[in-house]
Image (cartoon, rainbow, N blue to C red):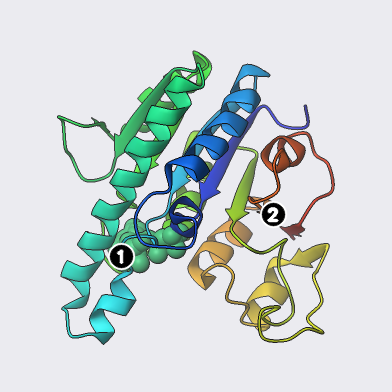
């Protein structure tokens, strides 16, 4: 295995299978892949997005106050966490959910040192509710959590895209995918596949990132094993 401890960011979009809510078949398939990686002895923590429920920016455009809309976004991530927890346990691994907004009936609060203990015991740790703060994204939280728990790499699992392209492959058939990319180039090109705050945090603390396609079965294991897939972003 190339890595001993990884932080996996799963976009909310993937959980919805393209629509609003959770697609149990998709979450079950992701959970099985994650469970295989955990069973292979790699410590895995996950940050789950919430774009399949609500995005603060979109609700704001439609008239809501941004901060309240962002809290809705964060609560949406928790539903994804519970779905992932359920299917991961069905796939035979132990899990813990920790949330940045306290909700003791459904999850533990975010306690980084406790999260590390869970990881050492071979449990999948699932982080929900983003940072607990509006005006952030789950990409940025993924970079922060990766740093705080000492993950060696931030694996950015995306839906419907193989990696980072120089322009949107959905609208430009000539778009080219990068195999490697520096943090600075990512920021200069203003690429939209992750937010700039996440990239600059990764740059400042030298956290390598790998963007890869979640739709391809087995890709999570490939990324963890250090196979060349997707786009690697580093110094
Ligand atoms: N969010 C937030 N603070 C955070 C993380 C998330 O306010 O620390 C809100 C924000 O409104 C965001 C939504 O939660 O749009 C869902 O997260 P995100 O868009 O990052 O999910 P993804 O695109 O990965 O599915």
Q: Which residue is mark 2?
A: 212
Q: Which residue is mark 1?
A: 54
Note whether ligand 1 is within 8 Å of mark 1.
Answer: yes
- Judge left or right: residue 206 versus residue 120: right
Q: Quadrant of residue 51?
A: bottom left
Q: Position of residue 18 (x, y in %)?
A: 48, 62
Q: Quadrant of the N terminus?
A: top right
Q: Quadrant of ligand 1?
A: bottom left
Check the image and report above or below for 184 versus 140. below
Callout 2: SS: strand
Q: Residue at x 68, y 67 (%)?
A: 183
Disc sitting over residue 123 in the figure: none
Q: Residue at x 68, y 83 (%)?
A: 189
Q: Quadrant of the C terminus?
A: bottom right
Check the image and report above or below for 129 versus 196. above
Residue 125 visible from this viewpoint:
yes
Q: Residue at x 18, y 85 (%)?
A: 63
Check the image and report above or below for 45 versus 41. below
Check the image and report above or below for 198 versus 156. below
- Nearest the viewer among 184 and 229 is 229
Callout 1: SS: loop
- Judge left or right: residue 221 versus residue 138: right
Q: Position of residue 219 (x, y in %)?
A: 72, 43
- Judge left or right: residue 75 versus residue 24: left
Residue 116 visible from this viewpoint:
no
């Amino acid at each position: 295995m190339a890595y001993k401890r990884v932080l996996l960011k799963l976009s909310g979009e993937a959980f919805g299978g393209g629509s609003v809510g959770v697609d149990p078949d998709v979450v079950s398939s992701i959970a099985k892949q994650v469970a295989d990686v955990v069973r292979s002895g790699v410590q895995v923590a996950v940050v789950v997005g919430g774009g399949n429920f609500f995005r603060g920016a979109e609700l704001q455009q439609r008239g809501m106050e941004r901060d309240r809309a962002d809290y809705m976004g964060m609560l949406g991530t928790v539903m994804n966490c519970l779905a992932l927890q359920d299917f991961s346990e069905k796939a035979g691994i132990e899990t813990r959910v920790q949330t940045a907004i306290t909700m003791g009936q459904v999850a533990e609060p975010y306690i980084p040192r406790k999260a590390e203990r869970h990881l050492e015991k071979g449990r999948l740790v699932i982080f929900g509710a983003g940072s607990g703060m509006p005006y952030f994204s789950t990409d940025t939280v993924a970079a922060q959590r990766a740093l705080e728990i000492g993950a060696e790499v931030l694996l950015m699992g995306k839906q419907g895209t193989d990696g980072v392209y120089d322009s949107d492959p959905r609208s430009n058939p000539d778009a080219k995918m990068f195999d490697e990319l520096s943090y600075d180039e990512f920021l200069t090109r203003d690429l939209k596949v992750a937010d700039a705050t996440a990239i600059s945090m990764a740059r400042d603390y030298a956290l390598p990132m790998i963007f890869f396609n979640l739709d391809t079965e087995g890709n999570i294991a490939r990324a963890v094993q250090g196979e060349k897939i997707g786009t690697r972003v580093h110094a």
